[in-house]
Amino acid sequence: MDCRDVIDRLSEYLDQEVLLAVREELEAHFADCEGCRIYIETLKKTITLYRSEADSQCPEQVRARLHAILSIEYRKK
């Protein structure tokens, strides 16, 4: 399993929707790959922070700016 395979399966891994054998392969990769290990830990922290702030409301001005930026990036692709 290489880094690209890991990234393709991260959602399933975090949602605990992968087979045990795949989970073990991913975790073996994390043990050997510092970049992927840092990536998954950062992603887990981001999810935790998001969930802890889920009740907070994003100010409309910030929401509009974020939407505009995402629209621009989407059009680039």
Image: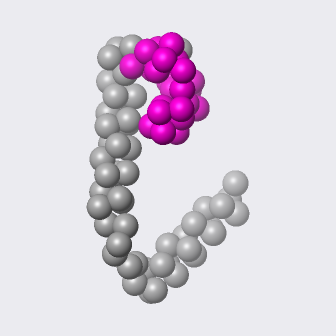
Residue at 38% from the left image edge and 35% from the top image edge: 40
Q: Residue at x 52, y 39 (%)?
A: 11
Q: Is residue 32 above or below residue 64?
A: above
- Percent x, y for residue 30? 37, 21
Q: Is 41 inside the magenta-drawn segment? A: no
Instruction: Classify residue 73 as left or right of residue 16.
Output: right
Position in image of residue 14 (x %, y %): 45, 37
Point 37% across, 51% down: residue: 47
The residue lying toward the viewer, choosing from 65 and 6, is 6
User: Is residue 5 visible from the viewing direction of this image?
Assistant: yes
Looking at the picture, tell me which residue is in the foreground, 45 or 73: 45
Q: Magenta: predominant secondary structure element?
A: helix
Classify residue 55 as left or right of residue 72: left
Q: Quadrant of residue 50?
A: bottom left
- Specify the quadrant that holds the C terminus: bottom right
Task: Where is residue 29? Give x, y as percent.
Answer: 41, 17
Which residue sits at x=48%, y=39%?
Answer: 15
Q: How many marks?
A: 0
Q: Which region shows up in magenta?
A: 2-27
Residues 28 and 16: in front is 16
> Which colour style is shown?
one colour
Q: Is residue 77 positioned above or below 58 on the image?
A: above
Residue 8: percent from the left, percent from the top?
Answer: 58, 32
Q: Is residue 7 visible?
A: no
Occupied quadrant, residue 74:
bottom right
Nearer-the-camera pick, 11 or 73: 11
